[in-house]
Amino acid sequence: MSVFLTHHTQSLLQTSLPPSVLSADANAYTARQDQLHGLLIELDKPLKRDALLDVLRTLTNVATEAQFQHSGDETLAWAALNRSTVAVYLQVMEVLLSQAARADEEAEWWRLVEQKGGGTAWYLLQTFPSRLKELSNQMLRTIRSHNRPISLSIFTPSSFDQLFPSIIFNKICKDSFFPHLQHPYNIFRTNPIELARQECRAKRLKLEKLRDQRAERLGVLSNLRAMVYDTLANNGLPDEVKERIATIVGLLEWSLTDDESALEDTQTKSVSLSDKRAQLQNLPGPEAIRRILPQLQDLLSTRIQINGVQHDFAFVSLQRPSRLTQLWPKLVFLPPLAYLAFKVIFNSRAQLYATLADAKATAIGFWHGWVLEPIRGIIETVRTGSDTAVVISKEGLKSDLDSLERMATALAKEKLKFTPAQLEELSAQVRQGDLTSVLKIYENDIKSPISSALTGSLIRTLLIQVQKVKVDVDLAASGIDKLLRSQELTFAFVGVAPSITILYVFGNWLKTVWTGSSGRGRFGGRQRRERVWIAIRRIERLLNALHAEPTPSVEAIVQQSTGRDESLPPSLTTGLLLLSINHLRSYGVAHLPPRSQLQMGFLEDVDDLEDAESRLSKAERLVIVQRMWRSWGRVLGWDRDVVGLR
């Protein structure tokens, strides 16, 4: 079940069982009652069509075999029947909503093609091969109808004029190239782009009519909500429950009918529903259950499938062209155009081939050197950790420090006559970087540098200081080494980030070419945000146009059965509102950041606007629409991007 219907019918799914069922002791159930109780548990959650059909078959078998000898048998059977009726009601609503949404989406695609001059010309080019194929087929059928063999002589001017007079050839061309046009155009004297635009308009109008038919039925079923709730809760006397179920089942059958005359003859439908209610009321409880269950099975197993086949038959010729049809001009014309562009840019073929070879080598080098190798480096870093040295090893630093220590202690022992205790203290000072004793010797030697250089220890003190500088450099390198080790994984990700960004941009470009979407990709892309803008605008127009009207017969039946005093809104308006709100909810769930304040706030506004419990007035819902314009207009680009401003 769709996200919208799950939310829209949540209160129905959460409706508790009747008190008589809840108060019963499950331990005292008979085998039949235990089976019925198990079916109730199954029906307490949303079921797919096949699973629901299995439950209905099991319930039918139980009801057929049972004599309802115990007092609780009939109560449990009615509770299971009520929940089965509601489950079938939700399945039919799901079918109608899906059909209306598909028709609305396709109608919107044709509207965009129709409005854009370049889009209409591009559509004409995309579909030209299929139109040419249809023309060839019709010409072949005409030739065969004249019992003429297919040969080249047929296409001589005299033979061609004999087989295809101008009027017939014009009709064949019109039927082949623009079969949806109703007026007898001479396609050789009319702008083909204008004819293609009229074809787009004709398909859009048919799709909008199909959408409105499904939306009207969806609205009728939505207006049944109060009746469905009472049926599920088993509120009222037995005759009232029978009347409600008969009305629901009758309207479900009506909503799946594709006969337009039957749909328009609401007076006949009113009489038919009244007859069904009367027949069911005259039957005892067990017989009424046995009468209704086959009708529910027929709805699920037969009527929904027949309705789907009929809808697809009407819908398939109105769909947008296939993805391959939309892409073939790019696939056919872009490679030679690119080749010609290269030939213009590069003078010789050898230079062109060299450039292509360089481009291939660059792509391979980029893939191996900047994508695969950095990723392997990241995996190796995670696997081995920080075992490998980056700048300097610990052993190298230790050997340099030990050498400095030995040089300093040897000089101090020889020149300053240090005792072992003093030498130990000097070793500790050297490890801390303190060479005060050595520097004192150096200060004395520098007073007479020449004699100290020849006979003294000046050179030794200088070499000790050189070793000290080397140790300091090693210590600095060791610090850098620790820093690099601590950030090794960070540097690895930084190294692969540019190549991943390039691949991401290139992948988005390929996705745009394949899906045909355009515009900025934020929040689903410009086209999706434009469709949301159209949906919220349609909701405001529908609410503004909502006013008291004479209630049609089908809606009068719903009003009478639900016991509501106030007039119900027109079914078409209700259905179109549900369709637009379904689009808003689907967009918010799929294209806004998940679990973000943005998504939560948007879906909260959609919840308020949906008003599944019918608590809000028209004026209050219009206030919610204004809040959505104010809150989301700038965030989703409704004020500039979507309407074509920059």
Image (cartoon, rainbow, N blue to C red):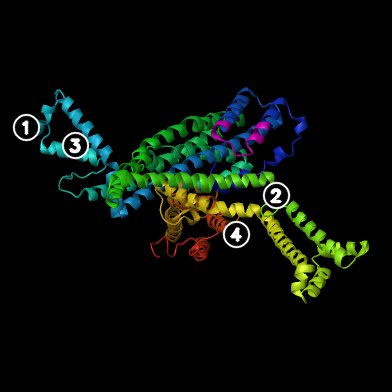
Per the rendered image, the range of residues in magenta is: 38-51
Whole-angstrom CA distance, mark 3 to mark 4, is: 59 Å
Q: Can the viewer see residue 215 in this picture?
A: no
Which circle, 1 or 3, is nearer the viewer?
1
Which residue matches tag 2? 386
Whole-angstrom CA distance, mark 2 to mark 4, is: 40 Å
Could you say which disc has been placed on residue 597 in the image?
Answer: 4
Which residue matches tag 3? 172
> Label 3: how many residues lie within 10 Å, few (<14), some (14-19) or many (20+)?
many
> Label 1: how many residues lie within 10 Å, few (<14), some (14-19) or many (20+)?
few
Which residue matches tag 1? 158
* Residue in the foreground of this view, choosing between 466 and 494: 466
Residue at left 10%, top 35%?
Answer: 165
> Label 4: how many residues lie within 10 Å, few (<14), some (14-19) or many (20+)?
few
Which numbered disc, 2 or 3, marks the residue that appears first in the sequence? Answer: 3
CB of mark 4 within 8 Å of CB of mark 1? no
Residue at left 58%, top 41%?
Answer: 240
Tell me if residue 45 is in the magenta stretch. yes
Whole-angstrom CA distance, mark 1 to mark 3, is: 18 Å
Which numbered disc, 4 or 1, marks the residue that appears first in the sequence? Answer: 1
Against 257, residue 478 (above or below) is: below
